[in-house]
Image (cartoon, rainbow, N blue to C red):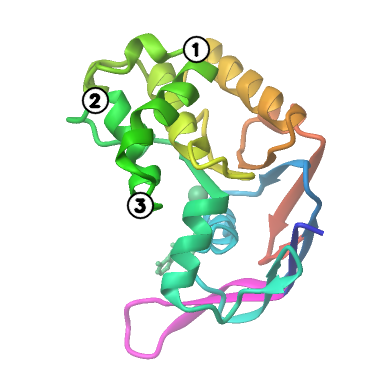
Amino acid sequence: MLIEMIGIEKVFKTGKVSAVSKILKGIDLTIEKGEMVAVKGSSGAGKSTLLHILGCLDRPTSGIYRLNGVDITNESSSNLSKIRNKRLGFVMQHFALVEDDNVLANVSVPLLFAKTPFSQVDALSMEKLRQLGIDHLAGQKVSKLSGGEKQRVAIARALVNNTDIILADEPTGALDQENSALIMDIFKKLNLLGTTIIIVTHEEFVANACERVITIADGKIA
Ligand SMILES: Nc1ncnc2c1ncn2[C@@H]1O[C@H](COP(=O)(O)OP(=O)(O)O)[C@@H](O)[C@H]1O
Ligand SMILES: [Mg+2]
C-alpha cells in the first residue's frame, strides 16, 4: 500500500479567539502504487486541505498517515521537506512558477534543494523538458509562456527528482479545453509509466479520465 490514511481530522482556527472549525472529520483512504485518483467535492469541502496533508505541506490535527507503510504523522518538518522533495510533485491551478526566471531555472529548483551536483542539474532538467516536449522553451522567461506551456513546465518540475507521486490541485482550472486535454494526456501517459497521480478537480472530464473517483462531503469520504 502506497498511501494509507486512517481517521484523518483537520481543525482550523477561524480567527476569533478559540473559534475552530473541523474541516476533515475522519478521512479513511488507501491508494495503491500506480493508481490515478480524482478527488471531487463542493467548494470548501476540504479537497485542498486533504491534498496538502497528502503532500506533507500540512499536518493533520489527528489520525495516522502512512507512506509506504511508514507512519509519517509525527515526522519532523525537515524530514517532511525531504520526503516532499524526493517523492511528491505538486501541480497547482496557477502553476506556482517563478515568472521572472526562465524555464530551465524553474525546473531545476527541486534538484538544487536535493543537493544534486551542479554539473548534473541542467542535463537532468533538460531531460524532463524533452520528455514533455518543451525543451525548446528552456531559455524562455516563464512570463512569456501560454498557460498550457506553463503547466507543462510545472509538471516537469514536479517530476525532475523522479518523484513517484503527483498531487495536482485543479490543474486544468486555468486552462482552455484544448490545453486541459493535453495536460490530462500527459497525466495518463505518466500514470501508464507507473506514476501515482491524485487530482483534485470539479471538472467532469478530468474525473472521467481517472480510474477512481472519491468525493469529500461533510468532512468525510462519501
Ligand atoms: N489555513 C487555513 N486556516 C483557516 N481555514 C482554512 C485554512 N485552509 C482552509 N481553510 C478552510 O477550510 C475549508 C476547506 O478549504 P479547502 O480545503 O481549500 O476547500 P476546497 O479545496 O475543497 O475548496 C474552507 O472553509 C477554508 O476556508
Ligand atoms: Mg481547493
Q: Which mark is residue 102?
A: 2
Q: Is residue 10 magenta?
A: yes
- Range of residues picked out in magenta: 7-25
Q: Where residue 171 sits: x, y (%)?
A: 52, 33
Q: Work out whether 60 lies above or below 177.
A: below
Dot 2 alpha-carbon crowd within 10 angstroms: few under 14, some 14 to 19, many 20 or more: some
Q: Which mark is residue 133?
A: 1
Residue lying at 49% horizontally and 12% vertically, measured from the top left? 133
Disc 1 to disc 2, C-alpha distance: 16 Å
Disc 2 to disc 3, C-alpha distance: 18 Å
Badges 2 and 3: C-beta atoms under 8 Å apart?
Answer: no
| Most common SS among magenta residues | strand
Q: In terms of image quadrants, where is residue 174?
A: top left
For discs 2 and 3, the disc positioned in front in the rendered view:
3
Which mark is first along the chain, 2 or 1? 2
Which mark is first along the chain, 3 or 2? 2
For discs 3 and 1, the disc positioned in front in the rendered view:
3
Q: In terms of image quadrants, where is residue 129?
A: top left
